[in-house]
Amino acid sequence: MNELQQADAVPAKAPPTGRYWLMWLVLLALQLVNLGSSYLPLGAFNVVVNVGISIVKALLVMAVFMHLSSASPVMRLAAGVGFFFLAVLIGLSLGDYMTRP
Amino acid sequence: MTTIAAEGAPSYISAGYTLRSWLTTRDHKRIALLYGVSILFFFLVAAAAAAMIRLELLTPAGDLVDDDTYNKLFTVHGVVMVWFFLIPSIPSTFGNFLIPLMIGAKDVAFPRLNLASWYIYTLGGLFVVVTLIAGGVDTGWTFYTPYTTMFSNSHVILAVTGVFIVGFSSIFTGLNFIVTVHQMRAPGMTWFRLPLFVWAHYATSLVMVLATPVLAMTLALIAIERLLGVGIFDPALGGDPLLFQHLFWFYSHPAVYIMILPAMGVVSEVITCFSRKPVFGYQFMVYSLLAIAAVGFMVWGHHMFVSGQSMYAGMVFSLLSFLVAIPSAIKVFNWTATLYKGSVRFDAPMLYALGFIGLFMMGGITGIWLAALAADVHLTDTYFVVAHFHYIMVGGAVMAFFSALHFWWPKVTGRLYPDGWARAGAIVMFVGFNLTFFPQYIAGYLGMPRRYHVYPPEFQVLNVLSSGGAVVLGVGYLLPLLYLWWSLRRGRLAGANPWGATGLEWQTPSPPPTYNFASAPRVEGPPYAYQAGGTDGR
Amino acid sequence: MAAEGTSAMAASHFADAEQRETAATFGMWIFLATEVLFFGVLFAGYTVSRVQHAEAFILAGRHTDVLLGSINTAVLLTSSLTMALAVRAGSVGWRRSCAAWLVLTAVLGVAFLAIKGYEWHEDWLQGLVPGLRFAYSGPDAPGVELFFFLYFVMTGLHALHLTIGILVIAVMALLAARGRFSAAYHTPIVLTGLYWHFIDVVWIFLYPLFYLVSRS
Amino acid sequence: MSHFERFIAEASSAAGQTDALLLALTVVSVLVVGGISLTIAVFAVRWHAGSKAPRGPVPDRSRVAEGLWIGIPLLVFLGIFIWAAVLFHQLRTPPPGALAIDVVAKQWMWKIQHPDGQREINELHIPVNRPIELVMTSQDVIHSFFVPAFRIKQDVLPGRYTTLSFTPIRTGRYQLFCAEFCGTNHSEMRGTVIVMSPSAFSDWLAANPGEGSLADQGAALFREYGCSGCHGASSTVHAPKLNGLYGHPVMLANGTQVTADARYIRDSILLPASQVAAGYTPIMPSFKGQVSEEDILKLVAYIRSLSVAENQP
Ligand code: HEA
Ligand code: HEA
Ligand code: CUA
Ligand SMILES: [Cu+2]
């Protein structure tokens, strides 16, 4: 009927649970990597690695647990738009702090 | 009030007369009226403050009220005008009333949320009223730290709580509109058949939903900082007051587009109807609405050119501010082109709409002055800025509000108002407005700082002019109140479509029945299918 | 029973139940976008403060409990799994299984709060609560105080969301057990799930920002 | 001569340039607003309902028009942007050899300290045609230093130094305003900038000897606060010598490098551990809450004088 409903129709049968359990293991593994990496002396890169892994984890949660991987494009857009403008907020403010004399 | 009803179906007004039937309604049209009444109340509160401000500024000395009182006056004027009048003004009244009608839906997607948002608004308003009774707040509507967190002796927390709460009403309205437009369109109502009014509200809603939470959290931080004496804004504790400004303007610049986009939507409807032509460059108009909303998020630093922000950040924000003006320019040009070879009538809504274009242009172009770095260094925090934003917000948005009021009054109430009076009102308002605010441009250029209770005597002439203009402007506001009130009982019955307008809202009786349409409408063609020079149905 | 729920819930202004479910899910996503920016202010504040007080944040980061923080992260990730399983059970109409997974999720949520509460208690004893009981002294105290200010506001707001989530889940579990949901109508569970996962996503970012600073 | 004269006065080197920009903006605005209003009026009247003017079919859109409507404003805007940004850059770049004067703002007054120790309140005496650089900070809330006749303005923040540079080009008395809302008497936080001929200025300096130069006063404070106990030549404490520090890069313990400017020295005094000099233990106590903003500026002046004396060729 409209663009939201096409891709988001009620699933006919139960999706298998395997991917949920798998995802759980992956997330726990990533958490361990995150924890472990923070003990490596990487200097400023510790933050990059830490936050990078968190972004991956967040994307996985949203894709699998929150069903974005099978959602309509509009749904995905709604999920992404908040993060986009948050990036604008942090990016442009930080631009000020980084370029002050 | 008697109303005509479509083949016996009761209109939304006659669906019930008890107070309870209004306070528990889920009908978007009734909620719109609830909002209308509340907004009128807060407009009068803030206008009273404006009247006091203008009276005080008649003389250079501070003889009417003392310093603190004056500071509280402009604070309450700004806070109430912005959050309790202008931001909800068009969206929660006309937007609420018309969007379901215009897309051929029975109601908004979440009617209960809609009603809840009105209660939240009222609760927020209550806090502001309590603030006023308790003695007011004196920080300016911008709540700059560390003054607000550490130095002000007024009721900051109460006021901030009120604004925090009203923010959620804005968020819920926006959320509702977005889902409604996505989900509730009638068969055949494709995206590019939506009236621009709906598009404008869609763009506005995006801003409401994405910017308002930032304001809410920032104000919450202010309250915490004031309560506990710790926080991230106080320089004495290692915090940074500019961080507050960044966060505040990240909301408040997009918020100015919350105020102007719905106005642009109104004007697009009115211009097309009274020139009997489809809007010029419909798709372009849509994209420019969306572009204003999106790019509007990236220009906030233009309020901070002299604040101690880095010079390079200033340059980036300046450039982006120029870019965001381009879609506004497109809209002005397209409205102008719509008149070309049209069949132009000068009914009251049209007069207001034409006034809007002129005054918005003035306000917008002086925005360009302020976006130009070196010019802003001189002009910022002077009356030039005050003139800039009143030109857009009062000359633009409020004019558009009155345009909408006159255009859809017959639809909302089923009655016509006296045309001559209405046109006179529009003209008085236009003249009074320019008298009030044009002198402020000059005062600002000459260096008169804003938020000044006492000022050097050189500026008196300009200030007296401005105060005189405010009286005329005040009359311009009062006139419609009178004849519209009169029309409620005595006005001629309007019929479904007094202007011969296209648009689904005109295809249902005035006032519309509870579920809007007797049967779900089906949309077959593009919007604004007017014929230039053709008969206009009257 | 289930069919009744459907017709009762499908408000008359919607064309059909499907339109209603999509609208609700979409609305929830928009609400979550709002939440992203609501929390986002604090993330922005954190970023700026950290840039300005790099050294102090490193010092302060040593005072959070990485063990408890990591356990809590695992707890919350696990609760996301149980929530996902609950939603799935709900979507095929297994009401008892759905209720059971929901209860488990809520229990994990409570466990998280308990651990968090214990941590806060420890912080209190150590005098790390800005504004109320802050005993840290030394040259970097202002920066450390900022760190803990953000720590309390952010974990506090997160805990508030979690508490609301637990209450909602409890209600859902009750309704599910009573058979209010079916394969045809289970939107509230889906929405609860989205909300819960979002809380998890927030924590996924809080974890490195507060527990993994300066471990190396 | 009207009352406005002294406000329109272009009394700084920047004023004329800003006015030129404003004039250009005025011209553009009048053309645009006037042109469009006129077009609207002509269209509306010529094609008012019932007029006999020819109508005929018109397109609903036109790619050419749309291109022009993006292109023309874009070009105009880019021109204005570049002009204004270049001027702004100029405003923000202090000319060499500027006379540095300290400004401390507080609710609701301006306190000024000249390098030679003269202090004044709500008045600023400066010589004409000499570049001035104000180093400003606030003791409480945000204020803003605004002299309309100079077309300059800069916010004054607590906990930070902001600077404002300009060159007065005309003698006379000019209004100084506080332009950022700062509480009850914001509108009375005003003053006068008095631009004098060089000779009159030196007379004024001589007639107001003050309490010795800022640097001298700073030297006294340096002993008073016990700084010399660690930083003095005869000190046994392992602390950096401050001679030749000002204006030079400093290696910090965390591996970064900063330039020792006023802000760095201020931070060193108030938050010594935030930027520890490489090779030293952070034993320096914080003087936060003990030293007033004015005294800090004096200490800065003293430390600055230590390197000016040495490094000036
Ligand atoms: C509805 C409200 C609204 C709107 C829509 C705008 C729109 C704009 N504003 Fe305004 N502004 C405010 C409300 C608004 N503003 C408020 C309330 C403040 C003060 C807040 C406070 O401090 O209290 C403020 C302050 C403000 C400042 C900061 C001033 C200062 O404090 O120093 C600046 C600086 O860049 C600015 C710029 C702009 C620009 C570039 C636009 C643009 O979007 C305008 C675009 C429109 C046009 C340009 C007109 C039409 C275009 C044409 C006809 C095209 C042809 C033109 C040319 C070729 C030149 N505004
Ligand atoms: C929607 C927004 C909105 C609207 C509609 C208005 C409407 C008006 N505003 Fe407002 N204004 C703001 C938003 C708005 N303002 C904001 C955000 C600020 C900044 C606040 C801050 O600095 O924090 C501000 C600040 C502001 C100032 C600057 C104060 C200062 O810096 O010291 C002034 C001064 O003239 C002013 C005047 C007016 C006037 C005359 C009207 C008129 O349109 C109102 C007309 C109505 C009446 C005049 C009352 C009814 C008439 C009568 C009862 C007749 C008798 C009248 C007289 C005796 C005068 N406003
Ligand atoms: Cu100081 Cu205003
Ligand atoms: Cu802005």
Image (tube, coloured by chain):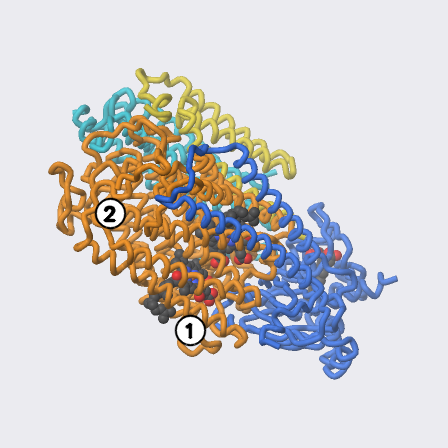
Q: Name the residue nearer the viewer: B422 or D209.
A: B422
Quarter of the picture holding the C terminus of chain B: top left
Q: Position of residue D84 (x, y in %)?
A: 64, 53
Shade representing chain C = cyan
- The answer as to whether callout 2 falls within 8 Å of ligand 2 is no
Q: In this view, does C196 lie above or below D127?
A: above
Shade representing chain A = yellow
* Residue at the extreme right: D313
Q: In this view, does D30 lie to the left or right of A75?
A: right
Q: Which residue is drawn at 55% across and 45% down?
A: C47
Q: The orange chain is which one?
A: B
**Which residue matches tag 1?**
B56
**Which residue matches tag 2?**
B410
Q: The blue chain is which one?
A: D
Q: What residue type is labelled 1?
A: Glu
Q: Which of marks 1 and 2 is nearer the N terminus?
A: 1
Q: Helix, strand or loop at disc 1?
A: helix
